[in-house]
Image (tube, rainbow, N blue to C red):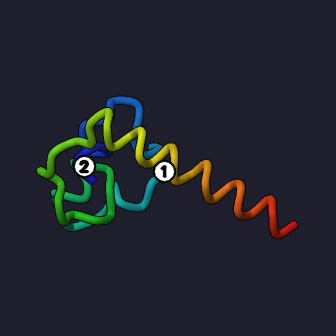
Amino acid sequence: IGTLTRCEKCKPSPNWLGNYSPKIQIRKSGLWLTQHLNAEEINNEDVIVIEKLIDKTKKWVESRE
């Protein structure tokens, strides 16, 4: 959540229903989930771990086809 909050390219569309939320945190962040908005971003090591897990999952899915 902290990473998405800081992402300049990760913004909701103008038609996103959250723009009408009574909660200012939702409107400002562009996210429905407000917990961990101030959490640290993931680092490069985290990205590598995530990429490896995605590859592992893709291989597992392909093996089941």
* SS under mark 1: loop
Residue 43, position as x, y percentages in the image: 26, 37
Residue type, numbered disc 1:
Asn
| Quarter of the figure that contains the C terminus | bottom right
Q: Name the foreground residue: 15 vs 9.
A: 9
The residue positioned 45% from the left and 54% from the top of the image is: 16
In the rendered view, tell whether residue 37 sits above or below residue 63. above
The residue positioned 17% from the left and 60% from the top of the image is: 36
Residue 22, position as x, y percentages in the image: 21, 67
Q: Is residue 64 left or right of residue 22?
A: right
* SS under mark 2: helix
- Circle 1 packing at 10 Å, graded few (<14), some (14-19), many (20+), is few
**For the residues marked 2 and 1, what is the alpha-carbon distance in whole angstroms?**
15 Å
Q: Is residue 45 left or right of residue 2?
A: right
In the rendered view, tell whether residue 23 sits above or below residue 14. below
In the rendered view, tell whether residue 64 sits above or below residue 39. below
Q: Name the foreground residue: 29 vs 43.
A: 43
- Sequence-earlier tag: 2 or 1: 1
Pointer 2 residue: 29
- Whether residues under marks 2 and 1 lie with C-beta atoms below 8 angstroms apart, the answer is no
Residue type, numbered disc 2:
Ser
Pointer 1 residue: 15
Residue 57, position as x, y percentages in the image: 62, 59
Residue 59, position as x, y percentages in the image: 71, 55
Q: Residue furthest left?
A: 38
